[in-house]
Image: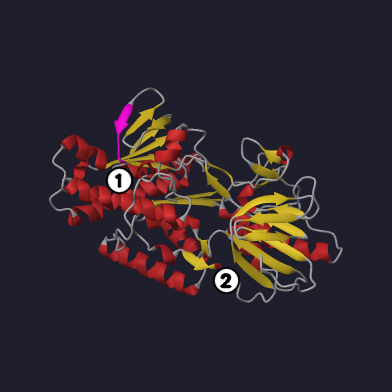
Amino acid sequence: MNLPNTGQKRLVIIGGGFAGISLAKKLSEIDLQIVLLDRHNYHTFQPLLYQVSTSGLEPDSIAYPIRKVLKHLENLYFRMAAVERIDPEQQFIFTNTGNLHYDYLVMATGTKTNFFGNPNIARHAMPMKTVPQALNIRSLMLQNFEKADDCQDPIERKALLNFCIIGAGPTGVELAGAFAELKNNVFPKDYKHLNIDEMEINLFEGGARVLSPMSENASKKAAEFLENLGVRIHLKTLASDYDGETVTLKDGTKIRSKNFIWTAGVTGASIEGFDNHILVERLNRYKVNRYNQVEGFENIFAIGDIAYMETEDFPLGHPQVAQPAIQQGELLADNLEKLVEGKDMKPFKYVDKGTMATIGRNKAVADIKKLRFGGFFAWFIWMFVHLMALVGFRNKVVVFFNWAYNYINYDKAARLIMRPFKPKAEITGKNTD
């Protein structure tokens, strides 16, 4: 890998998500050569991916060039590369574009979709962890509506208009609400000769309630909002198989659907090269101490969703959401400076700022410390927090304009099939992600 010899020790950060970017942004004063590796040249604001997949936003309004985010760092070198393996003994990183040595290593690789070992679901389901995947969902949705508008077979048309979302966490709930708003406000105008009542939105959850990480009050309100929008909620219901056309539930029930979206779980995006004992097997996350040092190493750190830190307040590790990643990244920047200078590092303590989920227009739920909000006020808080958290002034302006336009006109302007989606089954040996 082409990197200059500056005479400085080298810090390599793997991953340009919330954790990696938060860390890098605060390293302007450190006497190290910083190398940031990511398979994409942009940072994705993942909480708004569902709006890309449902035509509410264009992808460039929630993505921002990594080089531009970190342009103030003179000692930073960005390389677009996929890390394939790490040799912790030789302190070497192997990527698809070249190899490099490190003195300090930070893994901020986040998570990937967890299909729980089901190969059929992994092959045919639509995940939503990246911008390309969100665009795939958008294209598939619109393509199926175009087919349904020209379909004479009522059974086939019903399958084309049946949306099955697996997993009722924040992503699944927000996605279901967005599809319901399309059904109620947008598609009746676009497809005037199609019976939009034939569109079904089914939300499946293996647990006893939606939004299980949130309070019971939030779960109850979210379920009420969804049902009022026309979403069918199936609790204590697991999907065991999907062949591209038929969903098979664990009790044997079969449902025909051409739109099967998987939001049921994630697993850590770990990297080959470490002994298994430092991984929490069921979660695929690296065990770290209170300073985010990977177990058994002083110069290797893990932050964000890939890090598993047991504390008194969080005996099962911190939640895999943006705030722990951001806070760990910011603290590690200070701790790395202390480590380089030979000073004592500061242990991490997570400050929980609350959890929110939006279900649609004027509908959201929020748990902020001991306060519980639902309805318009929670929706307003959700919008403000997410707007301010976006990277880049341009993105803030574009998203605000889109939201204002959508609110006033009951419309979503990004209903474009820019690149038709083809299922993996139709593409021999090619990965559509």
Q: Where is residue 184 in the image (x, y as percent from the top left)?
A: 25, 50
Tell which of 97 and 222 is nearer to you: 97
- Give the residue drawn at x 16%, y 37%: 154
Look at the image and tell me in which quarter the N terminus lies. bottom right
Residue receiving disc 1: 229
Evaluate if marks 2 and 1 touch, with contact meaning CB atoms under 8 Å apart: no
Q: Where is residue 363 in the image (x, y as percent from the top left)?
A: 38, 52
Q: Which residue lies furthest to the right in this view?
A: 342
Q: Indicate yes or no whether the magenta region holds residue 150.
A: no
Q: Position of residue 182 (x, y in %)?
A: 28, 52
Q: Where is residue 91 in the image (x, y as percent from the top left)?
A: 77, 55
Image position of 53 with respect to 236: above or below: below
Residue receiving disc 2: 67
Q: What stretch is highlighted in magenta?
A: 254-258
Give the side of residue 127 with respect to residue 29, left or right.
Answer: left
- Give the residue drawn at x 66%, y 66%: 24
Q: Work out whether mark 2 precedes mark 1 in sequence or the reverse, and give the earlier one.
A: 2
The type of residue carrying mark 1 is: Leu
Question: Do we see residue 370 in this rendering?
Answer: no
Q: Distance between the residues labelled 2 and 1?
A: 41 Å
Tell which of 345 and 281 is nearer to you: 281
The secondary structure making up most of the magenta span is: strand
The type of residue carrying mark 2 is: Arg
SS assignment at label 1: helix
